[in-house]
Image: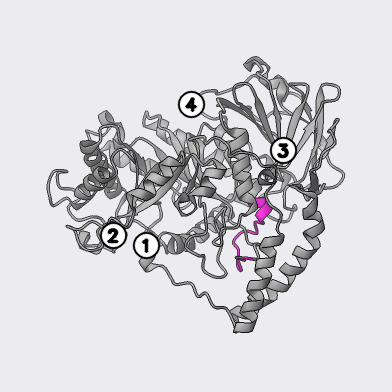
Amino acid sequence: MSKFPLTPDAALPRHPLSHRGRGAQQTPRIGTREKLGYTTPRSSFAASVATWLRGKLARQYAPLSQRPKVATGRGAGGEGIRLLTLLALLVILLPPAAAHAQGEPPPTPDPRFGAVETYHTPELADEAGVGWTRIIFYWSELKKDGPEEWNEFHAPLARIDREIAGGREVVGLLKHTPAFATDGIEGAGVPRGLYLPVDDPGNLWAGFVREVVSAYEGRINRWIIWNEPDIPIDVFGAAWQGSVADYYQLVKVAYLAAHEVDPDVQIHLGGLTYWHNPGYLREFLTAASADPTAAENGYYFDVVSLHVYFKPETTLDIVGATRATLAEFGLEKPIWINETNAPPYDDPAQPWEEPVFRVTQEMQASFLVQEFALALALDVERIAVYKWVDEPEPLPGFEPYGLVRYDRSLRPAYDAFRTIVRLYSGTVDAVHVERPELQQVMLFRGGSVTRVLWARTPTGVAVRVPALADSALLVDATGGETHLTPRGGEYRLTLAGAPCTPDSECLMGGPPLLLVEEASPAPESWPEMAAQVEGLAAQNPSAPAVAGDPPASSVLRAGGLALPPLAIVLGAGVALIVAAAIPLLRRGRD
């Protein structure tokens, strides 16, 4: 995939494409937002993410038996009844998603776009077109009754089969050492006998891998080995007690044992947080290089896994650094982003009381559209949102990750995911164009082109977009649509500004717009297809301004989101219900 180097605006359209193709070295990025002064310093952002990850790990990745219990009664009976009534009314009055209101069929799944743990609500995953899912297989749960037993209820075959029937590939993640299998910390300790030969019964990890791969053979042929091993053991929430060399041995043994069962099995490195130790992958490959058998076996892994949260533009740096590290060792491996998200703080159903970053539900939707577009432009092989549904129920006051709430109602990010599948699927090439005021990704989909644009500045950005066809579909993050015809061979749009000020964090860009046209432009014309910046808007628009000839439409726009007209009528009622519910929530926690 491709990326233009950052050049002066006037010169950019004539600049040739550079560094196309998988594994190509990416053009070094210039910190344009740093120049404008709209950024969080790298060290501050990294520290904030690292702090947040510690709590996330402890709450989300412990086996169910070790997770804190959620109190369901909040306050006296009368208040609880009134609160439930208000929340029920809120759910009833909330407008349906634009796509559902229009009665559109589910989008065809693209295997590149996934979500973690869709098995809790497989029907909703079917509706959204989720193409793959990740499920954790806890060693300590599968063997909770001892090394000779097998807990078939932990990950039943029927659950796996339902996911496959929905068009989703299941990717398994193995982790959490049982107490009987380690001399270290339960859950994080190095398995006993790890350095014994793979066929030695004393190598407990080899025996477990062989057994789990056999149990799910024919259903699962991709296994992720542990999770976030780059977090130091003295950091709260760490999942791996061993050294980097121990982790390499863990991966190697898993690779050898799994291939005894299934010669075509794929072994993935555990997802790396990056910010806890940016050099971890290099340390891992250095340890592997000391093994004379590593090089001839591809270093005993097939895929590098990454976790990226909150700030889409960091994906450019993280993926670029990962490819550069692989190249140092003569390797070219696929890169997956196994987890990505920006959990919101403002959901009345699950408010995050002390957010590390103040992300709204609308920003969460924008994040997914931006992140998935950049991942395609960087030739990331697959990407998944963490996570699909708030299951188990989040602790009161903590961040909600799900695109689907615990009560199975939908956040705006659900419709954003559905929009991604519908308008990103089938991408065969992508071009990323970065300018100080604007990010844009052009997705070439074999007969159609989706151009994804978003502002990088706190004020809106006015742009001119060359037309490729006689008409276009303008789509917002959650699927609201407007049909356009060009004027003078171009569309003129005003993009809403990024949700920040010069004195605050710019985690992500403004609400993105997707311009979709039926066209098959030749690659040599791609540089001329990029949008041109006319200037910053006089004020930050609450809805995208469009210059063209949009046909009459029943879709109204409010705050950049597409809503049916009925939603506008009900808006005041929803606001009153939310206002009444929040004080009751607070009193119930006192």
Residue designated by label 1: 63
- Which element carries disc 4, helix, strand or loop? loop
78 vs 451, nearest the viewer: 78
Question: Which residue is at 46% across, 53% downward?
Answer: 276
Q: Amino acid at mark 3?
A: Val
Tell whether 550 sits left or right of 288: right
How far separated are the C-alphas under marks 1 and 2?
8 Å
**Which element is circle 3 on?**
strand
Q: Nearer the viewer, residue 278 or 148?
A: 148
**First-in-chain label (2 vs 4):** 4
The type of residue carrying mark 4 is Arg
In terms of sequence position, does the residue under pointer 1 or pointer 2 come before the other?
1
Instruction: Indicate which disc residue 140 carries.
Output: 2
Seen at 44% across and 72% down, the residue is 69
Q: Is residue 366 visible?
A: yes
Frontmost residue, 339 versus 40: 339
Answer left or right for 487 relative to 411: right
- Crowding near pointer 2: few (<14 within 10 Å), some, many (20+)? many
Which tag, 4 or 3, sits closer to the chain's start?
4
Q: Which residue is mark 3?
A: 475
**Residue at image x 39%, y 37%?**
303
Say whether marks 1 and 2 touch (CB < 8 Å): yes
First reached walking from the N terminus: tag 3 or tag 1 = 1
> Which residue corresponds to mark 4?
22
* Residue 290 is one of the magenta-drawn residues: no
The part of the image, by quadrant, that contains residue 399 is bottom right
> Which residues are drawn in magenta?
349-364
Display colour scheme? one colour
